[in-house]
Image (spheres, coloured by chain):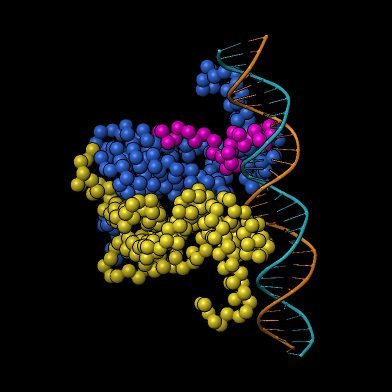
Chain colours: A yellow, B blue, C cyan, D orange
Amino acid sequence: MSHPSMGRRERKKAATRQAIADAALRLFLERGYDEVGIREIADAADVSTTTLFKHFPVKEALVFDEDSGQEARLLAAVRERPKGQSIPAALREHALTTRVATADGDARFAAFTNLVAGTPALRDYAQNMWLRHTAALAQAIAEESGLAADDPLCGALAHFALEAPRAAYAHENPREAIARAFDLLEHGWSHQLSGTRLR
Amino acid sequence: MSHPSMGRRERKKAATRQAIADAALRLFLERGYDEVGIREIADAADVSTTTLFKHFPVKEALVFDEDSGQEARLLAAVRERPKGQSIPAALREHALTTRVATADGDARFAAFTNLVAGTPALRDYAQNMWLRHTAALAQAIAEESGLAADDPLCGALAHFALEAPRAAYAHENPREAIARAFDLLEHGWSHQLSGTRLR
DNA sequence: CTTAATAAGTGCAACGGTTCCACTTTTGAA
DNA sequence: TTCAAAAGTGGAACCGTTGCACTTATTAAG
């Protein structure tokens, strides 16, 4: 697929990996994450458990294949934003576009989301996995904003920008949820209450 | 201790629980979290592993005894804040006081913090445990602010207020880190760059 | 083309956290 | 006194995960 110049070895390796991931996802969707054991997945993919763990370091990783590249795109969204656009605005836009691109109208994706949302172990893993990008994003923000690299502001903004989209999943209208969260980021809490009764 | 009106049964139960927690913490500090097994802790506390798990559902919980009450105090800090004080301000103050109260000058506490910080499993567990208060705090914020209970703003603010102090741990001057993060929360990103060169 | 190095995969035993189960002991209340 | 609930026991078993010694396939070099 990706590179016809891949030798037989790497192609076979990729095939094995794919076979494992496919078998795992199928079984998980059929019977639930906690009801399927590692040995069973290995059997279904016709490999040994040892081989399985060579490809996926932990059981949760079987669900979250295909994570690479996301961090890169995230950083690019900040670094290569249009002139005059603020950093939070760039993050907001990135969150909106990627969210819409993946979540709209795909039945398989919905089933996948349900699987993750309905399994505590997967929820926790997904959250921690996603937040692991925080440090990298914080550094990019520091460079772009001219703030000190260890300024808590950068870490806070980075964390927030990563967390907001995830929280928006739970809402009926994720786009508006994202927009609202980023409004808070840009203008602050005090500004949000203008239209509301203040207390 | 807490209630002399506790019957013998509950007193013994509490004693057992304490014995387990003490043994666990002692061994963890001596040799490291990953180097101490459940069976070993149970032996040291002179109970069966079954009993141990009746008191602490997972190994990590052995480290984080004494969590109850924190959520209540957090909510109280929001609900019973002085008149005229904003919600983020109340959260900021609460973060600062509890952080200072526990972190200052206590050697045992420092060792404990190192233990957690140096053990990935504990870091992750602590983060997820703490963030579990998010929903409750978000509701309190909604009530106090007059916003809709499901307004993403409340969830975002709650999450942020819980996460900021944890991130501040890593900084050399936690108090300033907390202050800075909450400044972002109150006045927004655009306001932060006033003193800096904008890009 | 042989050869030697390397990477992928195997099978199995073991470990550590966790659960299950049938059982005994202690305690509180009727 | 009696009895049911609660606390604790012991040990086997489950499951994710790792280590080890081993075979097989692929590649690159001579």
> Considering only vertical position in the picture, is C30 above or below A186?
above
Q: Nearer the viewer, residue A166 or B5?
A: A166
The quadrant where residue A164 appears: bottom left
Q: Nearer the viewer, residue B62 or A114?
A: A114
User: Residue, x 54% and y 60% (percent of image)?
Assistant: A25
Total residue callouts: 0
Inspect the magenta stretch and tell me whether residue A64 lies in it. Answer: no
Q: Which quadrant is home to the C terminus of chain A?
A: top left
The quadrant where residue C22 appears: top right
In the image: residue B49, left or right of residue B196: right
Q: Nearer the viewer, residue A157 or A177?
A: A177
Horizontal and vertical percent position of residue B94: 37, 38
What span is colored magenta in the figure? Answer: B44-73
User: Residue, x 35% and y 48% (percent of image)?
Assistant: B156
> Considering only vertical position in the picture, is B127 above or below A28?
above
> Considering only vertical position in the picture, is A77 above or below B41?
below
> Considering only vertical position in the picture, is A183 above or below A104?
above
User: Residue, x 28% and y 33% (percent of image)?
Assistant: B82
User: Residue, x 45% and y 54% (percent of image)?
Assistant: A114
Q: Is residue B176 visible?
A: no
In the image: residue A126, left or right of residue C18: left
Horizontal and vertical percent position of residue A62: 56, 60
